[in-house]
Image (cartoon, rainbow, N blue to C red):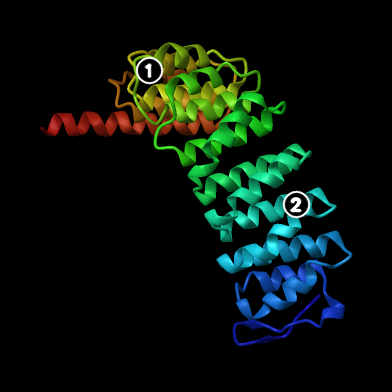
Amino acid sequence: MDFSRRGDLVSKPREDELDADALVQLGLTRDAAYSDLYTHALQHHQIEVRIAAVRALGWLRQPSIAGLLLPMLSDTDETVRRWAASSLALCGHTEIAPQIRDYMTDETVPTVKASLARTLGWLGDKGSIEHLKRCVVHDSCGQVRGACLQALIRLSDGLDVAFLLAACQDSDAAVRIQALRGLAQGPSKTTEATLQDCAFDLDPEVRVFAIKALVSTGASGAQKHCLLALKDSNPGVRCAGLIGLRDGDFPLDESSFEHCLQDSHPEVRQQAALTKSVLEISRVEKNQR
């Protein structure tokens, strides 16, 4: 549907000609003048229109909108509920956190439940910490456990190391990745053995985050694992190894990564070339001292 433009504003469509594209165009203006139209669209019979209305309301980023979005967490369509949770993360406030926890408890669709967990993290509600911890331990879905741990990392100044180490043993890679993100936020001698074990995880994305955590925490075995990563079968892990060698400011020897300059994957070659450039710059600076 096309709309005439007057200045920088998009003209308001009639309620009887509402469609999803129209609402998206209006939503992108972030103009609160259209909020009544969005509110009407929340009751529209078409799922796509309700989704567009929920998203547009979130883009307004106004705390007063939360009251309109909360009932949409009971919508019959799971995609509407998921977008409502995401929009509440943009415009919500800590006062609605107890209601979101209630919706999360009743929710049966993992993607929606995970979105609600992340919303609690974005709202910064410290009162949700124990609820999220219980979900990390007891929820049957790895996607939900991972989202809850992600929210906990956002909410907590520093999660208990033992809690994160236990999460590193989770059966789901999404949880192990979030646990590694948490461990990477602070050096601890008690975590290095677990980080090194995770560097050999069967899931390549877990290996990537393990390497990042080893480097960021200054672990003694970080350089060794970066070098081992250069021989990994997964290009993402090889890239992580090259990035780790640079970020860790380790003594570099071109012979240790020159084979990556001929790698079959273009991104690995690009990272290897960048690493070589960093090495050459370092040599020049050293000679100028």
Dot 2 amino acid type:
Arg
Q: Is residue 24 visible?
A: yes
Pick the front one: 230 or 69: 69
Residue most extreme to the left: 289
- The 10 Å Cα crowd at callout 2, few under 14, some 14 to 19, many 20 or more, is many
Corner quadrant of residue 213? top left
Going 70% across and 71% down the picture, which residue do you hit?
A: 25
Label at residue 67: none
Residue, disc 2: 81
Q: Secondary structure at mark 2?
A: helix
Residue 222: give x, y in percent of width and height: 38, 17
Q: Looking at the picture, does residue 111 appear above or below residue 85?
A: above
**Within 10 Å of the Cα at label 1, are there few (<14), some (14-19), or many (20+) other Cα atoms?**
many
Q: Nearer the viewer, residue 221 or 164?
A: 164
Q: Secondary structure at mark 1?
A: helix
Where, quadrant-wise, is the N terminus in this rendering?
A: bottom right
Q: Quadrant of the C terminus?
A: top left
Please determine whether, in this image, residue 15 is positioned above or below residue 25.
below
Q: On screen, 57 above or below 73? A: below
Residue linked to disc 1: 222
- Tell me, yes or no, if residue 263 can be seen here: no
**Comparing marks 1 and 2, which lies closer to the viewer?**
2
Q: Where residue 162 sits: x, y (%)?
A: 46, 19
The residue under the point 49% across, 25% down is 180
